[in-house]
Amino acid sequence: MALSPTDDVPQDLPEPGADPAAAPGEAGSTRRLLPLLFTGNAAMYALYLGVGSVLLPLQIEHLDPAAKVANLGLVGGVSAIFATVFNPVAGALSDRSGRRNPWILGGGLAAVAAMALLGGVDTVLLVCLAWCLGQAAMNCYQAALTSVVPDRVPAARRGTASAAVGLGLPVGSVLGVLVASAFSDRLRTGYLALGLLVALAGLLFGGLARERRMPARQPVPLREQAAAFLGVLRVPDFRWAFIGRALLVLGYFAVVGYQLYILQDHVELPAGLAPEDAVAILTPISAVTMAVSTVLGGVLSDRLDRRKLFVGVSAGLSAASLLIPVLSPTWPGMIVFSAVNGLAFGCFMAVDTALVTMVLPRAEDAARDMGVLNIANAGPQIVAPFVASAVVGLGGYTPLFLLGAALAVAGALAVRPIRGVR
């Protein structure tokens, strides 16, 4: 049932994760699901980070070195529009079909074709078009995968499940950057390798994750779907969770999306260390601290039954980390920044994901509503490249770090009005 713009949060509907068809209360079923969630998310982040941090910036720089900052902003911004559109649409289609696994598998297979195309183009325009197709495929995959937690995991286990999901980010980021760096002189092979990782993860999930088909729904007119997408943001707790996620992600990607160029143009690297090799060093450092904070944050938030405290503190720590390269624009400063930023972002994403699943307005619209929330991930990526390129063009990279810190502070403050979750 669609949520109209004037509906309040219903009090008598089952909470997400209470779907009897998914049998979320079975601890054994949840334990079997966690490794598959980790694998699926690790492959997804490997592609996102490998492409976004290494392959795409290198490809754009090779095509037009003088305009690399502006072109990366253009490609990143336009492709993120596709991500924003396809995520909730794919979520709604997944809800309508009553299935998740086929969408995960289909998105993974489509990613291989999109990456093969991206590796074979030789103009900035074609790179933009191919990465748009890649974003469309990956967001079909992501929308369905994200919905598995509210579908099949009980509320008491959401923090632990979100930790398994969150661990995919540090592990996937290391894997993706290492693969991309290994093929920095063979971009086509690098793109294809990352696409195959996602396809294999989709095959594994589809083959091993048991799924009981939910009742299929009747098609909903486009106008009603649009009203439902907008209407869910009228629910106060969901709206504040959306705003907090959007602000922190905007600050994060405004900086991380330009990490390769920061290392090229802002930081003096040790002799003999190439910027792409520096990325391959910083990413595992960030990943280790991110993995630690993801597990600790998810498990402790379950035990203490506190979500907002962890989200707010980690967002504040993220802001502090972004000041380190301002005070020390050196290679050691970047190492410390990567470690602290990973610590903050890992805890934030793990606990915030658990928080979000607890403020979903309707259990039966979980994929659609998680898709709307994922606009808070994809939407800032539309703005971030344009904002970052403008800020760098006007004042260099120091103002960019300051902007990221200010946005993280605002993200920390945004979770305070949430009332339905401690």
Image: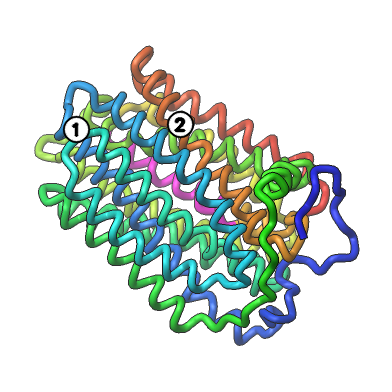
> Quarter-wise, where is residue 274 in the image?
top left
Quick check: is 347 in the magenta stretch?
yes
Q: Is residue 38 left or right of residue 239?
A: left
Residue found at the very far right of the displayed protein: 12
The reply to whether residue 199 is visible in this rendering is: yes
> Which residue: 77% across, 46% down?
237
Q: Position of residue 186 (x, y in %)?
A: 12, 51
Question: What amino acid does circle 1 point to?
Answer: Glu
Secondary structure predominantly adopted by residues drawn in magenta:
helix
Residue 382: % across, % down? 47, 34
254 or 215: nearer the viewer: 215
User: What residue is rendered at 45% in x and 60% in y?
Assistant: 291
Real-space Cα separation, disc 2 to disc 1, in angstroms = 19 Å
Number of numbered markers? 2
> Is residue 341 rendered magenta in the image?
yes
- Pointer 1 local density, CA inside 10 Å: few below 14, some 14–19, many at least 20: some
- Magenta span: 331-350
Q: Nearer the viewer, residue 356 or 74?
A: 74
Would you identify the image quadrant in which residue 67 lies?
Answer: top left
Few, some or many C-alpha atoms within 10 Å of disc 2 (few <14, some 14-19, many ≥20)? many
State the residue position of label 2. Answer: 384
The reply to whether residue 422 is in sight is: no
Q: On screen, 57 above or below 180?
A: above
Q: Which amino acid type is marked by label 2?
A: Ala
The numbered disc on residue 61 is: 1
SS at mark 2 in the image: helix
Image spot of residue 211 (x, y percent):
58, 81
